[in-house]
């Protein structure tokens, strides 16, 4: 009789990590591990880490620290640490946490079942953190489950070539590697055939999709298009109602990509375009390779092609050397662009990146004050932006019924706003209804079906 084995996966960080965790879950399912939400039931625990920001890294370490007691009670428990922190710290993690069994980086997640099988054979922890420029992202068709979500992430590339001075991604995920077009199209077609209505294309910099193939780094792959070309191919897949993508680098934003928002009816009018700072001096120190002037021109052009587009961004405050004048330039930018939303953070040193050695590090108190000021202003703008939708008719893709308020359904607009809609239903996740927006809130919209 086969004994059931259970795997528990905890994910920290970005959407790329969420997708990586789903991939590991599927690989483990193929190796007869059932996924569990009860950590006490697990025979294998995978902690998928993120090192882009210190807060996510600290949370991962905190959880791993708590697993020491669980390992002591259950010596057969296998504990694996995956992701960017694993890639960053490598073998030192076994010294810090000797109860770890496996340390694997992002390129090695596809080897997880094999590594689990080899655990304990030589009495030492297993380290799998190699990065190879010739790495190919394996083609794995997503497993279809009865509770399959109507919306899924699809990785189109991984890695980054930009080497922003604050960012650790090129060191932990390697250089840019694009997936072949056919693999992407086959995966999305498979998802749509099994009920998916919306996909989000993922990459550290989707705008540079395909460039590694043109340079010869990935020339064996059957990849013959750039990102706008890929979008046009994806848009033709029958039954795919909505397309989103993230993340974009402003320096690689082409007019051809902007034109896609005008041409493709199922490409959602939402663009996340990280600016990071409003000062050209700070942008140069960050190695962002664009100016505020060119950024603003691209924002203006985007709005010409798609007037209803919602633009969101990322902003870092307190970068080394940031003066009050530099910060005020960021505030000026926020007031000019009037973003629909922004993810804003205090700068934190990441090990090994160039900015960690910069002089004029900003005091924590000053960073906190600047962040509070920025977030307060952006909150005002977001509310003003949300009020612009009041009285409008919008298409809302249903996600689920609000169980605490019968007759109210939660969904998402094309502009990526959460919308709580009064409607009789019943609706299925992924179904699109028309609604009139009656009220704007800070984090959502409210409306009634029409």
Image (spheres, rainbow, N blue to C red):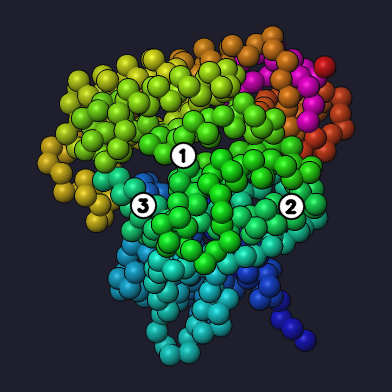
As rendered, which of 251 and 21 lies closer to the eye?
251
As helix, strand or loop, the secondary structure at mark 3 comes to loop
**In the rendered structure, which segment of residues is drawn in magenta?**
432-449
Specify whether residue 427 is painted magenta: no
Quadrant for the N terminus in the image:
bottom right
As helix, strand or loop, the secondary structure at mark 2 comes to helix
Label 2, residues with CA under 10 Å away: few <14, some 14-19, many ≥20: some
Quadrant for the C terminus in the image:
top right
Residue 156 in percent (x, y) is at 56, 52
Q: Residue at x 42, y 18 (%)?
A: 337
Specify whether residue 442 is painted magenta: yes
Q: Which residue is mark 3?
A: 161
Left or right of 10 on screen, residue 198: right
Q: Residue at x 71, y 81 (%)?
A: 3
Residue 367 in percent (x, y) is at 25, 31
Q: Residue furthest top?
A: 391
Residue 296 in percent (x, y) is at 39, 22
- Whether residues under marks 3 and 1 lie with C-beta atoms below 8 angstroms apart, the answer is no
Which mark identifies residue 337? none
Label 1, residues with CA under 10 Å away: few <14, some 14-19, many ≥20: many
> How far separated are the C-alphas under marks 1 and 2?
24 Å
Q: Residue at x 87, y 24 (%)?
A: 424
Label 3, residues with CA under 10 Å away: few <14, some 14-19, many ≥20: some
Q: Which residue is mark 2?
A: 189
């Amino acid at each position: 009789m086969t004994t059931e084995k259970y795997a528990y996966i905890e994910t920290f960080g970005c959407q790329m990590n969420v997708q990586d965790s789903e991939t590991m879950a599927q690989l483990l399912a193929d190796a007869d591990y059932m996924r569990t939400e009860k950590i006490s039931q697990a025979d294998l625990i995978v902690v998928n880490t993120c090192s882009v920001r210190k807060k996510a890294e600290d949370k991962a370490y905190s959880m791993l620290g708590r697993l020491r007691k669980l390992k002591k009670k259950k010596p057969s428990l296998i504990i694996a640490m995956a992701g960017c922190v694993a890639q960053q710290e490598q073998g030192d993690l076994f010294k810090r946490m000797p109860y770890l069994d496996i340390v694997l980086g992002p390129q090695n997640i596809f080897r997880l079942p094999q590594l689990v099988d080899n655990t304990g054979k030589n009495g030492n922890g297993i380290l799998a953190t190699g990065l190879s420029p010739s790495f190919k992202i394996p083609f794995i068709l997503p497993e279809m489950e009865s509770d399959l979500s109507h919306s899924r992430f699809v990785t189109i590339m991984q890695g980054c070539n930009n080497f922003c001075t604050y960012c650790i991604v090129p060191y932990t995920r390697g250089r840019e590697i694009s997936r072949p077009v056919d693999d992407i199209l086959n995966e999305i077609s498979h998802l749509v055939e099994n009920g998916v209505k919306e996909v989000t294309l993922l990459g550290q910099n989707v705008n540079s999709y395909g460039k590694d193939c043109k340079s010869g780094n990935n020339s064996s792959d059957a990849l013959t298009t750039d990102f706008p070309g890929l979008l046009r191919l994806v848009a033709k897949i029958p039954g795919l109602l909505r397309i989103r993508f993230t993340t974009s680098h402003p320096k690689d934003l082409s007019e051809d990509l902007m034109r896609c928002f005008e041409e493709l009816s199922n490409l959602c009018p939402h663009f996340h375009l990280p600016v990071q700072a409003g000062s050209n001096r700070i942008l140069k120190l960050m190695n962002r390779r664009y100016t505020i002037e060119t950024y603003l021109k691209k924002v203006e052009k985007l709005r010409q092609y798609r007037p209803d587009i919602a633009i969101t961004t990322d902003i870092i405050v307190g970068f080394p050397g940031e003066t009050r004048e530099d910060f005020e330039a960021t505030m000026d930018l926020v007031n000019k662009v009037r973003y629909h939303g922004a993810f804003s953070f205090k700068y934190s040193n990441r090990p090994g990146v160039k900015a960690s050695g910069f002089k004029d590090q900003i005091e924590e108190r000053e960073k906190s004050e600047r962040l509070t000021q920025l977030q307060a202003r952006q909150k005002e703008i977001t509310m003003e932006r949300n009020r612009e939708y009041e009285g409008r008719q919008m298409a809302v893709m249903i996600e689920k019924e609000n169980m605490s308020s019968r007759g109210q359904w939660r969904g998402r607009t094309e502009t990526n706003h959460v919308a709580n809609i009064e409607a009789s239903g019943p609706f299925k996740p992924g179904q699109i209804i028309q609604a009139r927006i009656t009220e704007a809130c800070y984090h959502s919209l409210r409306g009634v079906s029409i």
